Amino acid sequence: MMRRWDAEAVRQAMQVYLVMGSVNTTLDPVDVLRQAIAGGITLFQFREKGTGALAGEARITLAMRLREVCSQ
């Protein structure tokens, strides 16, 4: 069972939740993420799957770029 403060932290983090992968946009996903952060997202999930999804080193490289944007 979650403690009350844990549940509240989760609620706050999930106010505006973006799930995105490279196949979800025709733009650079890094630019889309930057715009989404500027627009007020509170949580981001990188989900790279489906037809045309990146794999291997390309997926890892994009994930690292997205993580860097989130860290900033």
Image (spheres, grey):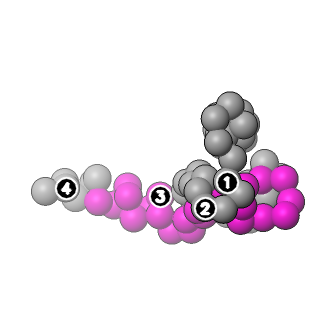
Q: In the rendered view, would you say 64 is above or below 6? A: above
Classed neighbour count for the residue bearing mark 2: other residues with Cα under 10 Å, few (<14), some (14–19), many (≥20): few
Label 4: state its secondary structure: loop
Magenta span includes 3: no
Quote the CA–CA distance across marks 1 and 3: 27 Å
Quote the CA–CA distance across marks 2 and 4: 33 Å
Query: Where does label 3 land, which residue?
Result: 13
Q: Which residues are magenta?
A: 7-29
Report the residue at 27% width, 54% height from top: 5
Classed neighbour count for the residue bearing mark 3: other residues with Cα under 10 Å, few (<14), some (14–19), many (≥20): some
**Mark 1 or mark 3, whichever is nearer to me:** 1
Q: Is residue 15 left or right of residue 9?
A: right
N-terminal of the pair, mark 4 or mark 1, is 4
Quote the CA–CA distance across marks 3 and 2: 27 Å
Q: Amino acid at mark 2?
A: Gly
Residue toward you, 51 or 17: 51
Quote the CA–CA distance across marks 1 and 2: 6 Å
Q: Amino acid at mark 3?
A: Ala
